[in-house]
Every structure is written in structure tokens, then in C-alpha cells.
Image (cartoon, rainbow, N blue to C red):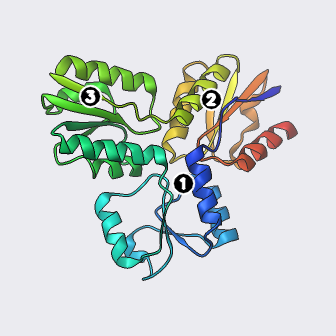
Amino acid sequence: MLIKLATNCGFCFGVKRAIRLAENNPNSVTLGELIHNSKETDRLKNRFAVSIARSIDEIESGKKVIIRTHGIEKKVRERLGEVTNDVIDATCPFVTKPQRIAEQMNQEGYQVVIFGDKTHPEVKGVLSYAGKDAIVVAAADELRRSGLKDRVALISQTTKSIEKFASLAEDLIKRCKETRIYNTICNATFDNQEAARALAKEADVMLIVGGKNSSNTKQLLSIVKEDCSDSYLVEGKDELDRAWFEGKKLCGISAGASTPHWIIEEVKNSLLEF
């Protein structure tokens, strides 16, 4: 069986930046998981003593705090300043962008529509800047159950599908008198998705490596399953099942934006042992 890596996969710019900030600031604490990859956050904890606080109440006064790549809610950020003056912002610039757009559009009187997952920390953060009339939808059909204003502004969670975003934009244009569209899906997400899609068309088994709580990783799995039904999501080498690869000729591997290269290599090397 041949093994082939997607031409674009693994760590994106924003995650690389966040990891570098954490490594350069040992003995700090991140407010929420820095990235959605438990193996990498464990490495940061073991090697650099970077711990995780689930809420501000868990942070010691004056402690050095790193804001996670997904960003935090506006009120939480304001409250954080009451706990410590030593704050390192690791929010991905591609996440800061929709936050700024949401705030500006709300100030200009537009209803902000966010394409994303309501429970995702990035979306919660963006929503906190978008005003009381803002809504979050995961698909175009949800718009029929939402009270839309005449003037709306559409933005997206940075890791969503461009095709679904376009479908949502088209529906809003038909339903509203004025629709402003901001494509806030990051380039790295688009490149990873296209590379995974291309590889899935030629592979007869696909592996997506990454955290199971990672939105962009789950999105990759959904994309490759369209062309390769035998596709699996694994967080690491220990989850590989030899039976998946019996009789297969080409195994393709892609990985989420928060998956470090060392985990991808471990998975690849374990496959070679098979």
C-alpha cells in the first residue's frame, strides 16, 4: 500500500504563532485550550509548564495569561484586565478580522449573520462583538426559522466550507433588501480542504489526523468522505486499525490546522510498520 500526504495539511500560520508564543512564555496559563489538539497542549504543559484555565476564576492574580487562538468573548477580555496586566494575545489574526467586521457592521445598523457552530469558542467570541440582533446559523435552511432584518451582513467562522458559505450568501441575497458579504474563511483552511479533496479522489482509504473537538478537522473528514467513503479521523497512531487498510492500494493522509507535524509523522511511521 502506498502512503501519500496531502500537499497542504497540518499547522496553519495562526497555530504556529500561538505555539511559538506559548513556548516563549513558560509557566503561563492559557484561558481555554490554546488549540484544539490535546496531544500538543499536553506537550506544552510537560515541557514548558503551560497550564489551562477553564475560566477567569481559575487564574491567579498577576499570572501571565495567553489568550487562545480562537479568541475570547468581549466581556471576558475586559474582565481579564482586572485579574492581570500580563496578557499575551495569541488570537489568530484571521479570527480577529471577523470580530472587527461584526462590531463595525453592528455599529452601522446591519444585522450580523454568522455562519458557524454556536458552541464553538471562535463563534462565541465573534458573536459577542455582533450586537443583540446577531444570529448564528449552520446551514441555509436555518434562515427560514430566523427573524431577518432588511439589512444584513454575512461573515463566517474561519474554518467552514466555502461552498456552504456561498449557498448561504445566495439565500440571503434573495431574502434581504441589502446583503453585505465578508468571506472570512481563512486561506489556510481553503488550501487544506482543496488538497484533501484532491487526494481523496485518488485514494481508496483516507486518514484525517487531528483533535476530535477541532472544527476544521471534522470539516476535512466531511469533505474527503464525499469522494472516499473509507475515511477515518484519528488523534494519533494508537487509534489506527489494521483492518482499515487490508486490500487498499493508496492511503491518503491529511491533517487539521491544529495538528503538529510530529503527530502526522507518528501516524505515517505506524502505517509503514503495517
Q: Which residue is mark 2?
A: 231
Q: Secondary structure at mark 2?
A: strand
Residue 134, quarter of picture: top left
How packed mark 3 is, by other alpha carbons closer than 10 Å (few <14, some 14-19, many 20 or more), is some
Residue 262 drawn at (x, y percent): 74, 49
152, 142: nearer the viewer: 152
Residues at marks 1 and 2, CA–CA distance in whole angstroms? 24 Å
Q: Which mark is residue 35?
A: 1
Residues at marks 3 and 2, CA–CA distance in whole angstroms? 37 Å
Q: Amino acid at mark 2?
A: Ser
Q: Which mark is residue 180?
A: 3
Q: Which residue shows up at 56% across the image and 32% down it? A: 221
175, 107: nearer the viewer: 107
Q: Quadrant of the C terminus?
A: top right
Q: Which residue shows up at 24% across the image and 23% down it? A: 172
> Which tag, 1 or 2, sits closer to the chain's start?
1
How packed mark 1 is, by other alpha carbons closer than 10 Å (few <14, some 14-19, many 20 or more), is many
Residue 226 drawn at (x, y percent): 54, 20
